[in-house]
Amino acid sequence: MIPMTTEDNNDALNERHRSRMQRKKAVVDAKIAAATDVRGVLLVNTGNGKGKSSSGFGMVIRAMGHDMQVGVVQFIKGAIPTGEERFLRRFPEQCSFHVMGEGYTWETQDRTRDIEKAQAAWACARELLNDPTVGLVLLDELNIALKYHYLDEQTVLADLRARPPAQHVVITGRGAPPELIDAADTVTDMTLVKHAFSQGIQAQPGVEL
Amino acid sequence: MIPMTTEDNNDALNERHRSRMQRKKAVVDAKIAAATDVRGVLLVNTGNGKGKSSSGFGMVIRAMGHDMQVGVVQFIKGAIPTGEERFLRRFPEQCSFHVMGEGYTWETQDRTRDIEKAQAAWACARELLNDPTVGLVLLDELNIALKYHYLDEQTVLADLRARPPAQHVVITGRGAPPELIDAADTVTDMTLVKHAFSQGIQAQPGVEL
């Protein structure tokens, strides 16, 4: 028997790759053909790992790249100006940016004031959710306001259901309530594998801030 | 015994909240005090859920908001122009954007060509990883190129280790190899809870594209 050369091996590998990819393409194409519904989607980013808010902001610029109007409401956060806020405030004609929090719950330590702030933030969110010219709304850290019962969950769910049919909404924060997960179309649990902070690395501009 | 009024109840609730938040603040503050290391971090977004690339793009604008120079290299992706590409190409002086892929592996079905493309993309990535003026580099879908062995993992790891000490790098894609996870400072597994696509909803501009 003549031993296979490297080239023969490579040809065999390439051929196996092609036929595997052809089978995969058939599966993917069938799924794409089945997904015919076009409507605004409700996305929830929850879990203890990094990436919930940043993924929301990635979708904000994705939408802006398609010339959509976008709106951002930041619940809870607000004590520290962030890079995303500084950046997106450059585009007031395309992105309406509302920082409505005063800091994490363990910083404010004032439940009554936190509730007032959360309710003002929801009033602001509701305006965006009523505006069919807004293509995507990011409700950053809303899950925290729900988890602490700063907002009435049923009101929030009803307002989300009543939004314009083509409008996309992204909700972020740890501890998304089960009813919100039920109502959502796409849910990701950002699962912590490891975090630089736990290894003694400071939160840094461009990464966490 | 005089029954508690609603106001008393609320006062008690507020007081419990305050003391719980004071304890939480002490824990958080101690962690912040312990995290004194300032250096470029290596972040990996992996897993089967949505949010890996979008989180990377959120960090890109976060860094841009802090007036950092950023670089993006897209491995694999490239067949379909995306919103994030359209948006970020508006800022050529601050963001160098390189689309180096030709589409998903099941679309190209050509291993030899995929390898050539991945290696050209790595040459481009290496230039960014050699440039200390670039504060953050996003290597989008690099994990896919590693998973298919389109690139030599040891070369990639060595180039990442040799980058400027203050430079942040975000790597995305399913199936991050274990050695990359070991090398990273922050790793998130974007765990799929559910996805609109599986419920018959098309990939839409501003959300997936």
Image: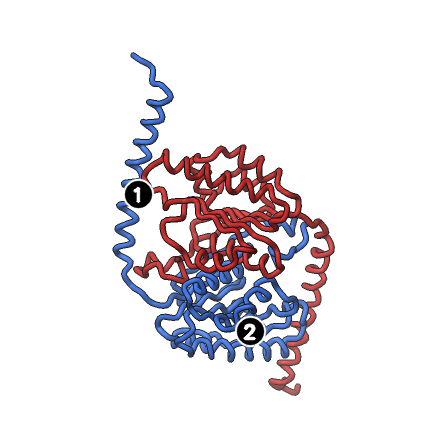
Chain colours: A blue, B red
- Of residues A178 and B59, the one nearer the viewer is B59
Q: Nearer the viewer, mark 1 or mark 2?
A: 2
Query: The C terminus of chain B lies in which quarter of the figure?
Result: bottom left
Residue at x 46% of width, y 47% of height: B74
Q: CA distance from mark 1 to mark 2?
A: 44 Å
As drawn, A99 above or below B93: below
Q: Quadrant of residue A99?
A: bottom right
Q: Dot 2 falls on which chain?
A: A
Instruction: Count neighbours of disc 1 (C-alpha within 10 A) and say few if under 14, some if 14 to 19, many if 20 or more.
Output: some
Which numbered tag is attached to residue A98?
Answer: 2
Percent across and percent down for residue B27 are 70, 59
Query: The N terminus of chain B lies in which quarter of the figure?
Result: bottom right
Which amino acid is tagged 1? Lys
- Of residues A68 and A140, the one nearer the viewer is A68
**Does any portion of residue A182 appear in the rendered image?**
no
Residue at x 46% of width, y 70% of height: A70
Residue at x 32% of width, y 60% of height: B202
Which amino acid is tagged 2? His
- Of residues B87 and B77, the one nearer the viewer is B87
Residue holding disc 1: A24
Q: Helix or strand or loop: what does disc 1 sit on?
A: helix
Sooner in the amino-acid sequence: mark 1 or mark 2: 1
